[in-house]
Image (spheres, grey):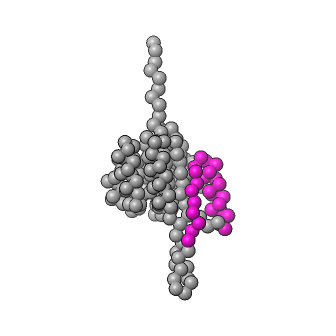
Amino acid sequence: MHQAPPTPKKRVAIFIDAANILYSQQTLGWEIDYKKFLSFFKKDFQLAIANFYSGKISKNTRQNKFFRKMGSLGYKVITKEVKWIRDKNGKVLKGKGNLDIELAIDLTQSIELYDTLILASGDSDFKPAVSFAKQKGKTVFVVSSRGHISKELIKAADQYIPMEKLKRHIKRSR
């Protein structure tokens, strides 16, 4: 009896907005194991892209070590130096290292390389990029935690996956 060849796995692109996911982890009270995160999606998909976008502080050796580890796991790490916002007296109010534009551009420019998009962010700024991917026939999953996901992004995606539901698959063990 002749068996049909297995159907090829769909190509997946994973785009992680590190700042947004950091806030999710703080709310959830547990951390993501990014190796497990990749493995979880590689079970059902052929990995085409795994990009991790984060602000960086060059002098932070712990952060630099983390970025190197992410690279060794198979992620392309895209960073931008954090810009410090100060008041008129020079007091630092906050650091800003937002890479939303870079992520959106990469997501749209690489559209032919994937069939399925996994966007790990809850930021409504990504709605136009998600809508673009869907117009191009891509299936879009948005992964974020409750309280950190915009209604606009949930509506724009094919499916919203609450990070809480993935906990047993992606939680970092101590």
Q: Is residue 150 left or right of residue 56?
A: left
Residue 76 shown left or right of residue 106 in the figure = right
In this view, the residue in front, 163 or 132, is 132
In the rendered image, is residue 162 in sight? no
Q: Residue at x 45, y 45 (%)?
A: 111
Q: Which residues are magenta?
A: 59-83
Q: Is residue 161 above or below residue 97?
A: above
Left/right placement of residue 58 relative to residue 43 reads right
Where's residue 55, x and y in %? 55, 64
Residue located 53% across and 76% down the image: 85
**Relative height, residue 20 to residue 50 (above, below):** below
Residue 169, horizontal then vertical, whole percent: 50, 47
Toward the viewer: 78 or 94? 78
The residue at the far bottom in this view is: 89
Q: Please name the residue shown 51% across and 38% down the image.
A: 46
Nearer the observer, 42 or 129: 129
In the displayed structure, 98 sits above or below 84; it is above
| Figure check: 38 above or below 100 | above
Image quarter (top left, top right, bottom left or bottom right) of the N terminus: top left
Question: Is 31 part of what is drawn in magenta?
Answer: no
